[in-house]
């Protein structure tokens, strides 16, 4: 994630992710399957109902997918109309994504590298949550295992003492 001066959200670039993950998710075959799912989702249209003006939108902390797929890169110099409609770019040669951006709700920036990077950013965020849950689960399982082993050993020791008291040892 790269912070944008004067904005609450960050922008994403593919360079920030491992090459294996980039190649696996963003190759033409995979992206051809992912892109329609993003376009059919309510990720971008939801922004229009949440943010009425530019000040609200620019101060918002939007998700990586929304940052990459629903708006053009800030460097392009597009003017805000609403969260999914932007006009009059001032610097279309600054980034290849600047020429890919389209106000059509089925297009937006779904073919942009920023959208692919936003998806990877979202995956990274979700994987961190999953890793935390997995680590906590392993710690709990180890704790239960140690208690169970201790209880089993104590039960065997008690049984040995009972045999000794009865004269079997």
Image (cartoon, rainbow, N blue to C red):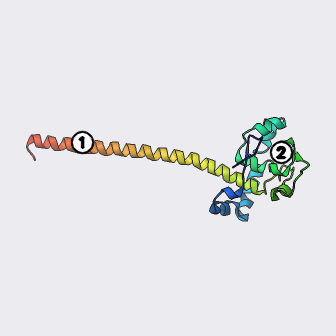
Which residue is farthest front?
Answer: 5
Q: Position of residue 125 (x, y in %)?
A: 63, 47
Q: Is residue 51 visible?
A: no
Q: Position of residue 140 (x, y in %)?
A: 43, 43
Residue 108, numbered label: none
Quarter of the figure with residue 42: top right
Query: Residue sitting at 86 percent across and 53 percent down?
Result: 102
Between marks 1 and 2, how big is the CA–CA gap?
67 Å
Provide the secondary structure element on which disc 2 rests. Answer: loop
Q: Which residue is mark 1?
A: 155
Which is nearer the eye, 151 or 61? Answer: 61
Give the residue at the far right of this rendering.
Answer: 88
Q: Determine the residue positioned at 75% across, 53% down.
A: 115
Disc number for residue 84: 2
In depth, the one of 91 and 61 nearer the eye is 91
In the image, 90 versus 155, the foreground residue is 90
Disc 2 packing (10 Å; few <14; some 14–19; many ≥20): many
Q: Residue furthest left?
A: 167
- Please say whether residue 83 is visible from this viewpoint: yes
């Amino acid at each position: 994630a790269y912070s944008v001066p004067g904005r609450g959200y960050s922008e994403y670039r593919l360079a920030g992710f491992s090459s294996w993950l980039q190649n696996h998710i963003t190759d033409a075959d995979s992206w051809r399957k992912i892109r329609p799912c993003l376009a059919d989702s309510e990720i971008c249209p939801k922004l229009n109902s949440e943010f009425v003006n530019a000040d609200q939108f620019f101060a918002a902390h939007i998700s990586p997918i929304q940052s990459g797929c629903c708006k053009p890169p800030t460097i392009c110099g597009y003017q805000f109309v609403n969260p999914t409609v932007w006009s009059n770019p001032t610097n279309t040669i600054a980034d290849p994504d600047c020429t890919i951006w389209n106000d059509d709700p089925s297009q937006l920036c779904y073919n942009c590298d920023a959208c692919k990077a936003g998806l990877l950013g979202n995956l990274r965020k979700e994987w961190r949550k999953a890793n935390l849950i997995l680590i906590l689960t392993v710690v709990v399982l180890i704790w239960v295992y140690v208690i169970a082993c201790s209880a089993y050993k104590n039960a065997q020791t008690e049984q040995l003492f009972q045999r000794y008291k009865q004269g079997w040892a």
